[in-house]
Amino acid sequence: ARSTLSSYQANTQLQEYLVSRIGKNNHNVKHKCLVIIKHVCRTGRPEFKREMGSNVDVIKECLQYKGPPDPLRGDEIYKRVRDAAREALDAIFDSQMSMTTSAVAAANRIQGLGNNYTPEEKKSSASQGFISNMVS
């Protein structure tokens, strides 16, 4: 997600790479790519989310992903891919989520570095309570 914030070119390269990897037939590769897409859509550059909308057909194919049952885990490995595809599509088309810019994301990371500001009403009531405790 951080690499997409650095430049638009990194954004498109990551998108192309992930879409090409989803085309592989390995369930682990599909699952990992879908989880990365979900994460980058929620925390990365807004253009990534917008442009992933044009590659939705590859992700929609993963909604019906099935294979021969694994002797140990059965259909669980394929269900995991289907669930990840559903979550990735939700992240791509989530209009309620605010699209953050890099400046807003940086401001959110820098909170709480020693600033102990309290609003005036809390400060005055807290100081009155302290003074009244000292006098009593």
Image (tube, helix red, strand yellow):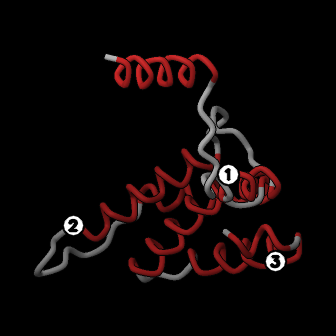
Residue density around tag 3, few if under 14, some if 14–19, many if 20 or more, within 10 Å: some
- Type of amino acid at the residue the image marks with label 1: Asn
Q: Is the N terminus in the top left, top right, bottom left or bottom right quadrant? A: bottom right
Residue density around tag 1, few if under 14, some if 14–19, many if 20 or more, within 10 Å: few
Mark before the other along the chain sequence, 1 or 3: 3
Name the residue tied to disc 3.
Answer: 10
Query: Residue 37: where, in percent of width, then height?
Result: 59, 64
Looking at the picture, does residue 130 appear above or below residue 113?
above
Separation of marks 1 and 3 at Cα, in angstroms: 23 Å
Mark before the other along the chain sequence, 2 or 1: 2
Residue density around tag 2, few if under 14, some if 14–19, many if 20 or more, within 10 Å: some
- Type of amino acid at the residue the image marks with label 2: Asp
Choose between 6 and 38: the one closer to the eye: 6
Query: Residue 25: where, in percent of width, then height?
Result: 46, 81
Separation of marks 3 and 2 at Cα, in angstroms: 35 Å
Which quadrant would residue 39 be assigned to in this image? bottom right
Asked whether disc 2 touches disc 1, contact meaning CB atoms under 8 Å apart, the reply is no
Looking at the rendered image, the disc whose residue lies closer to the viewer, 2 or 1, is: 1
Asked whether disc 1 touches disc 3, contact meaning CB atoms under 8 Å apart, the reply is no
> Is disc 3 placed on a helix, strand or loop?
helix
Looking at the picture, does residue 31 appear above or below residue 122?
below
Choose between 102 and 61: the one closer to the eye: 102
Looking at the rendered image, the disc whose residue lies closer to the viewer, 3 or 2, is: 3
Looking at the picture, does residue 33 appear above or below residue 79?
below
Choose between 20 and 84: the one closer to the eye: 84
Q: In the picture provided, is 63 more to the left or to the right than 90?
A: left
Name the residue tied to disc 2.
Answer: 75
Query: Residue 130: where, in percent of width, then height?
Result: 42, 25
Q: Residue at x 54, y 55 (%)?
A: 88
Mark before the other along the chain sequence, 3 or 2: 3
